[in-house]
Amino acid sequence: MTIRSVIIGSGHYLPEKCLTNADLTKIVDTSDEWIVERTGIHQRHIADEGQTTSLLATKAAEAAIKDAGIDATSIDLIVLATATPDYTFPSTATQVQAALGIHGGAAFDVQAVCSGFVYALATADNFIKAGSAKCALVIGAETFSRILDWTDRGTCVLFGDGAGAVVLEAQNGAGSNADRGVLCTHLRSDGRHRDKLYVDGGPSVSMTTGHLRMEGKEVFRHAVTNLAETVEETFRKSGVTPDEIKWFVPHQANRRIIEATAKKLNIDPARVVITVDKHGNTSAASIPLALSVARQDGRIAKGDLVLIEAMGGGFTWGSALIRW
Ligand code: ACO
């Protein structure tokens, strides 16, 4: 008998305000054509003043809890992935915990930027497998619009705001790939690449929040290599082959990165979930947002084998294999 972390509910939330590529041409020297050709992005959602990361996260969590059909108080662990917390401290997870009326268990944030959801899922899965939690809420939530330099056309066109969440429940499995739940996770990082994607401020360095800085070409180059490597590790260790994947739900940074990675891994393009066109890159929120969208529109069904992967600042990267 093996303890499995089974996804019993998912949900997401996007702020109402939508910023199109045409809107961006009024802010920076860019064009719809350039953005679509290089990234596949047509629009992104932007949080209004007062719409904090914890607010987006709480709304996504409420939707996931409703979908799971459980009482919020049965959640004994909240792991929230974000690089744009409400405050330096306390954690955004504890803000969400309070907003949901949960007063027991543990709540904390993890910071792995765009890989945050994969890191949070792996963390919650390990808590569940160790018997330290029975019902976990895993959230990815971001307000990246707050850390963008809106005069830098090389970065401000890429990102958006949003949140997604899943509820994990401890269930007994047989220990095979036929089990429902998180089947395996792989996490990696390499801190030598800080300067390729970072924020130029922080409490200890500058006492400011800072703005996102990126060497786009370098990030692109590493992304395809690192993402393919982590997924190949997942295939090797699980014994699963690319044709067994029902849905490939990658981090939604850029359509070209997604397509190049899927091609390198021999994954059928028809099995790839893409939301970057409508959401932009929402960092840690992008995978749970895409999972929730694909679940709601009927693509992801119970029993489907789902592969997720992401890479973000650090660099950090990772993947997970889930039977829904
Ligand atoms: N509109 C119009 N022109 C632009 C824009 C813009 N928004 N941004 C840059 N340009 C110009 C540049 O100034 C440059 O002009 P020049 O040739 O006159 O100097 C030209 O376009 C080419 O710029 P590059 O940066 O070389 O363009 P590139 O083809 O590399 O595309 C992009 C840039 C889209 C950022 C690409 O490098 C990329 O997708 N990188 C991956 C970055 C990413 O996805 N990061 C997300 C975070 S990490 C992650 O989630 C995996």
Image: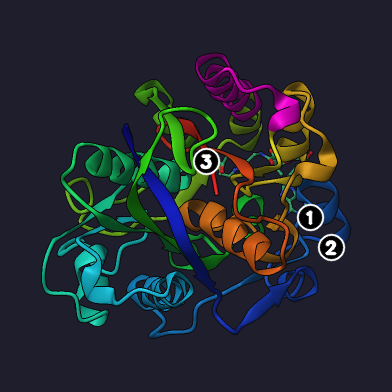
Tell me: is circle 1 under 8 Å from ligand 1.
Answer: yes
Residue at 78% of width from left, 37% of height from top?
Answer: 259
Say if residue 112 shows up in the picture: no
Q: Quadrant of residue 198?
A: top left
Residue type at mark 1: give it: Ile
Q: How far apart are marks 3 and 2 (CA)?
A: 36 Å
Upstream in sequence: badge 3 or badge 2: 2
Name the spot of residue 105 as percent of width and height, x first: 13, 61
Which residue is the site of mark 1? 35
Write down the region rendered in magenta. 222-244
Mark 3 touching mark 2, by CB under 8 A? Answer: no
Tell me: is circle 2 under 8 Å from ligand 1.
Answer: no
Asked if residue 172 lies left or right of residue 214, the reply is left
What secondary structure is marked by label 2?
Answer: helix
Q: Nearer the viewer, mark 3 or mark 2?
A: 3
Upstream in sequence: badge 3 or badge 1: 1
| Disc 2 residue crowd, few under 14, some 14–19, many 20+, Cα 10 Å | some
Mark 2 touching mark 1, by CB under 8 A? Answer: yes
Residue type at mark 2: give it: Asp
Magenta stretch: residue 68 in it? no
Which residue is the site of mark 3? 322
Q: How far apart are marks 3 and 1 (CA)?
A: 32 Å
